[in-house]
Amino acid sequence: MAWDEWEQLKAEAKQRRATHMQLNQVADPGGGGGPHHGDLTVCEKDLKAVGDAAFSLYTDFNQYSDLARISSMKAAGGLMDQGFLIGEALDHVATRWVDQVQSLLDACVHIYSHLDFTQAVHKGDDERIYATISSISTLDNGFDQHRGY
């Protein structure tokens, strides 16, 4: 690109100040989706709501699942003491219950931690993009001063 062409593009961009940014994209072959289809947006409020729900599920499920485990193991012990074979089966189910509960609790912690990390990363990205875009105007001013404007 020649310098004159660059200057012409800059002048045209200044005239179109109302349009700050335009992104080109390929139309979705499936159609639909509304006016914001394909846009990636991250809202801290939304991320916080999902993270809070994961934390709440973790807290509540941890408490209530423990009550179910204790009751089941107590019932299994009573049935085994009385010679019922179903007591062993119930004990096996209670043991498996503990494993499944732990898997769900781990998933909740993973979701909560990942969303917290995502918020921090996007905040850093926003700050980096702002700094980059802000420095472009400084760079343009330097070119303008060099050209004698």
Image: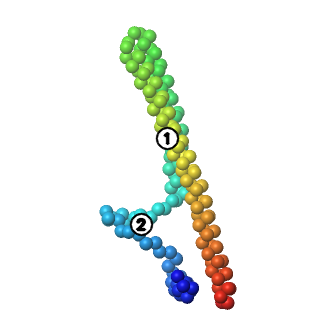
Hey, which quadrant is residue 88 in on the image? top left
CA gap between label 2 and label 1 equals 30 Å
Question: In the image, 7: left or right of 104?
Answer: right
Give how far across and how far down residue 20 sits, in percent. Answer: 52, 77
Name the residue that disc number 2 marks. 36
**Quick one: 51 or 28, which is closer to the camera?**
28
Name the residue that disc number 1 marks. 107
Number of residues whose C-alpha sits closer than 10 Å to that of mark 1, classed few (under 14), some (14–19) or many (20 or more): some
**Quick one: 130 or 60, which is closer to the camera?**
130
**Residue 117 versus residue 58 in the image, above or below:** below
Q: Is residue 104 visible?
A: yes
Secondary structure beneath label 1: helix
Q: Quadrant of the C terminus?
A: bottom right
Amino acid type, mark 1 = Ala
Give how far across and how far down residue 47 sits, in percent. Answer: 52, 54
Residue in the picture at 41% in, 24% down: 93
Give how far across and how far down residue 128 sits, in percent. Answer: 61, 64
Hey, which quadrant is residue 142 in on the image? bottom right
Amino acid type, mark 2 = His
**Residue 23 versus residue 108 in the image, above or below:** below
